[in-house]
Image (cartoon, grey):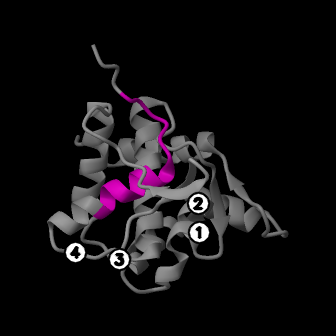
């Protein structure tokens, strides 16, 4: 019996999942929007499951939460649409081969449900709208960014992210 792949995942695999969803709907994503979608998915995953979605740490940058590997993967797109999935270089028989990290069909179904819901809720927002969401005064990004004079290498701790999204779930819970 095959074992289900469970989180945490490579952030590029999560980003590629959102790129696939966008492609199915004929939509394009830019680098800022993909950053925010992965961050939101990570936050909701922490709140719902108590476990991180991605293996990497989220950093506080000027324009909000950033996963460095996604910045590197998509920086060539600039502010335009992303035209290719994020890839990882691997050495195979002395040659560099690019592989595309994916969340495949054997992935944890609860995680896929969270990702699909994040896409349903936030997929029609543009990058600026999503950035504005992450810049609200009480967000993890704002707390870290505003509390530090040195803006280099700021990490947004998963516990802070989890606490924020748990509170968001309580605020928006039906009465």
Work out which residue is located at the far left of the displayed protein and give it. Answer: 25
Observer able to see residue 40: no
Q: Pick whichever of labels 3 and 4 is earlier in the sequence.
A: 4
* Nearer to us: label 4 or label 1: 1
| Residue 23 x, y percent position in the rendering | 21, 68
Query: Which mark is on residue 111?
Result: none
Work out which residue is located at the far right of the displayed protein and give it. Answer: 150
Please state which of residues 84 and 135 is positioned toward the viewer in this rendering. Answer: 84
Query: Which mark is on residue 27?
Result: 4
Which residue is labeled 1 in the image? 72
Please state which of residues 139 and 73 is positioned toward the viewer in this rendering. Answer: 73
Q: Pick whichever of labels 2 and 3 is earlier in the sequence.
A: 2
Identify the magenta region: 5-19
Residue 148's place in the image compared with 168, above or below, is below
Circle 1 SS class = helix
Majority secondary structure in the magenta region: helix
In the image, taking residue 65 as reference, residue 22 lies left or right, namely left
Residue 70's place in the image compared with 109, above or below, is below
Q: Pick whichever of labels 3 and 1 is earlier in the sequence.
A: 1
Which residue is labeled 3 in the image? 83
Work out which residue is located at the far front of the displayed protein and give it. Answer: 93
Circle 3 SS class = loop
* Nearer to us: label 2 or label 3: 3
């Amino acid at each position: 019996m095959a074992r289900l792949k469970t989180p945490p995942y490579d952030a590029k695999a999560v980003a590629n999942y959102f790129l696939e969803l966008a492609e199915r709907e004929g939509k394009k994503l830019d680098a800022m929007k993909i950053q925010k979608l992965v961050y939101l998915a990570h936050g909701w995953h922490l709140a719902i499951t108590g476990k991180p979605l991605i293996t990497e740490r989220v950093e506080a940058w000027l324009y909000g939460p950033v996963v460095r590997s996604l910045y590197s993967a998509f920086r060539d797109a600039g502010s335009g649409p992303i035209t290719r999935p994020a890839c990882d270089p691997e050495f195979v028989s002395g040659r560099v081969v690019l592989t595309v990290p994916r969340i495949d069909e054997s992935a944890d179904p609860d995680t896929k449900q969270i990702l699909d819901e994040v896409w349903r809720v936030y997929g029609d927002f543009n990058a600026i709208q999503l950035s504005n969401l992450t810049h609200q005064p009480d967000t993890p990004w704002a707390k870290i960014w505003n509390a530090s004079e040195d803006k280099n290498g700021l990490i947004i701790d998963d516990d802070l992210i989890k606490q924020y999204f748990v509170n968001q779930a309580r605020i928006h819970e039906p009465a």
